Amino acid sequence: MRKLGRFVLSGFAIAAWAQLAPPAREIPLYPGVAPGSEKWSYPEKTAGTPDRPQAQNIVRPVLLYYPAEKSNAVGTAMIVAPGGGFRTLMMSYEGVDVARRLNQIGVDAFVLKYRTIYTGPDAPAPGRGPAATGPQAGQNVREMAGADGQQAVRLLRQRAADFGVLPNRIGIIGYSAGGAVVLATVYGPDDGRPNFAAPVYAAGANSNPPPPGAPPLFIAVAADDQTVGFQGSIDLFAAWRKAGLPAELHVFQTGGHGFGKKGGGADRYLDRLEEWLRLNGWLTKASN
């Protein structure tokens, strides 16, 4: 066993995390304990496989900082919120892998480890509302995860100069449950709202009217997604267009939930995202 800060990692955990490029820095979202997590005393743990590691039992939400090469950096930042049903975070293909792809186009990336539902041996049965028992009893962790997304945007905007990005170029992309975190930032308070957002096969996508000052959206989903379906993404796009706001929608013929079913346009959705970012000027090199 090896200790890493307050956490203990097993040999499997070390092997799993070794597959991921390490961040330049780990940035806490809050100066102390995250509000509402004061009684969460259990350790973070890893799960998944070495090629697809997962993080669970997130108590201390952080941003993992992956900067673009300085010579290539354009002054744009993007938060990456992995999915995992609010119980785990898919840290590779919905996290660090995406961050490294964003780095290639000059975008500074920040992988968000938001708070998740407790998964210990005494965890209550899964449900959509607040837990009835356990260390999170009475708490809606989904809402807390959304608050972490808002705080991530707020923090990066406040400290934009520290990272060499512009405060009006803070974006966020999220997957499945991470897509719900994205939507919480889009519909949330002004100071925690991104300048652009990309909900990808997002949980909770619907036709709610956008708030005043809502950002442009890049929306992607697969027609054969059996987990969240595609209609919510279509409704979200329609709501943005009805309000006269910029939005782009991709409904790929195949891809499934997680875009794990290969052979279709979903394989190259990040190329489509790059085109959208370029179209809107977020890949134009800016002077700070």
Image: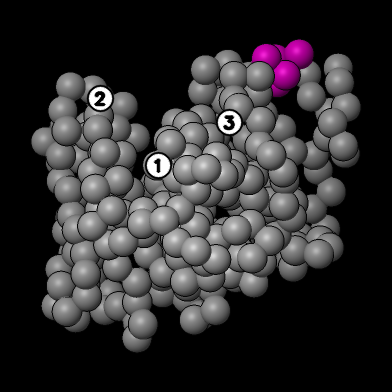
Q: Is residue 68 above or below residue 132?
A: above
Of 17 and 7, which appears nearest the observer?
Answer: 17
Residue at 17% x, 22% y is: 263
The reply to whether residue 268 is visible in this rendering is: yes
Image quadrant in which you'd find residue 149:
bottom right
Residue 129 in picture, x, y percent from top left: 52, 61
Q: For mark 1, does the 10 Å Cα neighbourhood hold few (<14), some (14 to 19), or many (20 or more) residues?
A: some
Residue at 23% x, 43% y is: 272
Q: Amino acid at mark 2?
A: Lys
Image quadrant in which you'd find residue 261:
top left
Q: For mark 2, does the 10 Å Cα neighbourhood hold few (<14), some (14 to 19), or many (20 or more) residues?
A: some
Residue 262 in picture, x, y percent from top left: 23, 22
Query: Which stretch is magenta?
Result: 11-15
Residue 116 in picture, x, y percent from top left: 61, 49
Q: Which mark is residue 261?
A: 2
Query: Which of disc 1 and disc 3 is earlier in sequence?
Result: 3
